[in-house]
Image (tube, grey):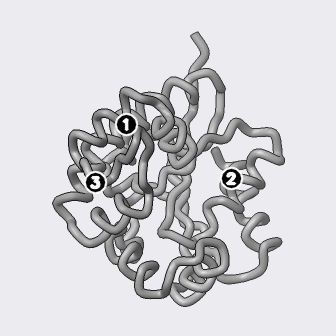
């Protein structure tokens, strides 16, 4: 059986995870996204029934009402923990099954530290970016208000003190600088 090396890519909302994963994919690496796996699950009846049992107002006519679910979980820490307790194990199970098929693969794991999954990976790349730049990046792509963005940021892990062994990747310069540093990190793996 092939030995698989799994690398998590994480960072706060708007830090540049998608850019990094896109570059890794373009360089020929296997790349996965917990958000994409979650989106897949949201189309499955069994998963939606479990969500509906936890959040009856968030599932309407057999489909997830993302806006309603987001408004509930980003304003209530207990509800957020309940959602994460249900979704994270299912997402991670699928993620690891897919990553096992490759000698080296990367996965975008937005809530890596919040879920306690960092030890399940062979390495962790953490994207760091100034808060103002993160807010602007999210505004451009999402249509969320600054208040909504800040509420989401406040619910995430604080990346100011990184756990030992993480590769810090700062995204406050040019894209070329970011990708140059990413190449150095990948070469060290």
For residue 148, side relative to residue 28 (left or right): left
Badge 2 or badge 3: first in the primary sequence: 2
Residue wearing tag 3 = 57
> On the rendered image, what quadrant is the N terminus found in?
top right
Compared to residue 3, the image places residue 20 above or below, namely below
Q: Position of residue 182 (x, y in %)?
A: 70, 60
Compared to residue 2, the image places residue 143 above or below, namely below
Residue wearing tag 1 = 48
Q: Residue at x 57, y 27 (%)?
A: 98
Badge 3 or badge 1: first in the primary sequence: 1
| 29 and 71: which is toward the camera | 71
| 59 and 105: which is toward the camera | 59
For residue 107, side relative to residue 86 (left or right): right
Disc 2 packing (10 Å; few <14; some 14–19; many ≥20): many
Disc 3, SS: helix
Disc 1 packing (10 Å; few <14; some 14–19; many ≥20): many
Disc 2, SS: helix
Q: Residue at x 40, y 52 (%)?
A: 112
For the residues labelled 1 and 2, the Cα–Cα distance comes to 28 Å
Can you tell which quarter of the image residue 150 is in?
bottom left
Q: Position of residue 171 (x, y in %)?
A: 64, 75
Q: Residue at x 57, y 72 (%)?
A: 14
Q: Which mark is residue 21?
A: 2
Q: Position of residue 116 (x, y in %)?
A: 30, 49
């Amino acid at each position: 059986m092939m030995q698989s090396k799994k690398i998590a890519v994480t960072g706060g909302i708007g830090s540049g995870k998608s850019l990094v994963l896109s570059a890794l994919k373009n360089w020929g690496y296997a790349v996965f996204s917990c958000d994409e796996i979650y989106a897949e699950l949201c189309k499955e009846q069994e998963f939606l029934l479990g969500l509906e049992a936890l959040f009856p107002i968030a599932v309407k006519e057999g489909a997830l009402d993302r806006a309603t679910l987001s408004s509930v979980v980003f304003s209530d820490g207990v509800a957020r923990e309940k959602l994460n307790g249900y979704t994270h194990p299912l997402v991670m199970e699928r993620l690891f099954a897919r990553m096992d098929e490759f000698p080296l693969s990367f996965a975008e794991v937005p809530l890596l530290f919040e879920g306690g999954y960092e030890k399940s990976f062979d390495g962790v790349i953490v994207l760091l970016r100034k808060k103002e730049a993160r807010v602007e990046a999210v505004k451009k792509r999402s249509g969320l208000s600054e208040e909504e963005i800040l509420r989401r940021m406040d619910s995430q892990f604080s990346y100011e003190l990184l756990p030992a062994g993480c590769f810090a990747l700062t995204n406050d310069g040019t894209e070329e600088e970011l990708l140059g540093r990413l190449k150095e990190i990948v070469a060290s793996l």
